[in-house]
Amino acid sequence: MKKQYFELNRLIERLHRRFIDVLKTELNRIGVRNINGVQALLLSNIGEEKITIRDLVERGYYLGSNVSYNIKKLTDLGYLNQEPTPPRPPLGHRQPDRKSLGGRPVLA
């Protein structure tokens, strides 16, 4: 079974790379040459939604430094508007509206 998972992982990665190539080809066809396939996919995943970089990373779409770089580039090129997010409370700070689980506070 382990071998099958490795093979499936390899195939998914290969499919992803091919899809990025298709996106880049399509971008070139329509004359968009200032972004790459990864950035086009990122724009597609964001859509019209207001989303944080943290949410993109937590959803498993991207790695932290990778998405930060691409968001900055897309913002610099005018494809995105980036707004600072309010800071999270410090770890261990209990929110007044949060419930506790098993007598322990849920951390933010």
Image (tube, grey):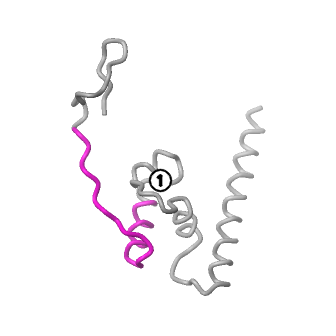
Question: Which residue is pictured at 41% across the width and 73% down the height?
Answer: 73
Residue under label 1: 63
Question: Which residue is pictured at 37% across the width and 76% down the height?
Answer: 76
Residue 96: x %, y % from top left: 22, 28
**Lateral position of residue 21 relative to residue 56, left or right:** right
**Lateral position of residue 87 relative to residue 19, left or right:** left
Q: Quadrant of residue 17?
A: bottom right
Residue 65: x %, y % from top left: 41, 58
Q: Quadrant of residue 89?
A: top left
Viewer-nearest residue: 81 or 92: 81
Residue 87: x %, y % from top left: 24, 48
For the C terminus, the quadrant is: top left
Q: Is residue 35 above or below residue 3?
A: below
**Lateral position of residue 81 relative to residue 7, left or right:** left
Instruction: Give the class, few, some or many, for how many residues have Cα within 10 Å of label 1's Cα (few <14, many ≥20).
Output: few
Q: Amino acid at mark 1?
A: Leu
Q: Is residue 54 above or below residue 69?
A: above
Question: Which residue is pictured at 40% across the width and 55% down the height?
Answer: 53
Residue range (magenta): 67-89
Number of numbered discs: 1
**Lateral position of residue 56 relative to residue 10, left or right:** left
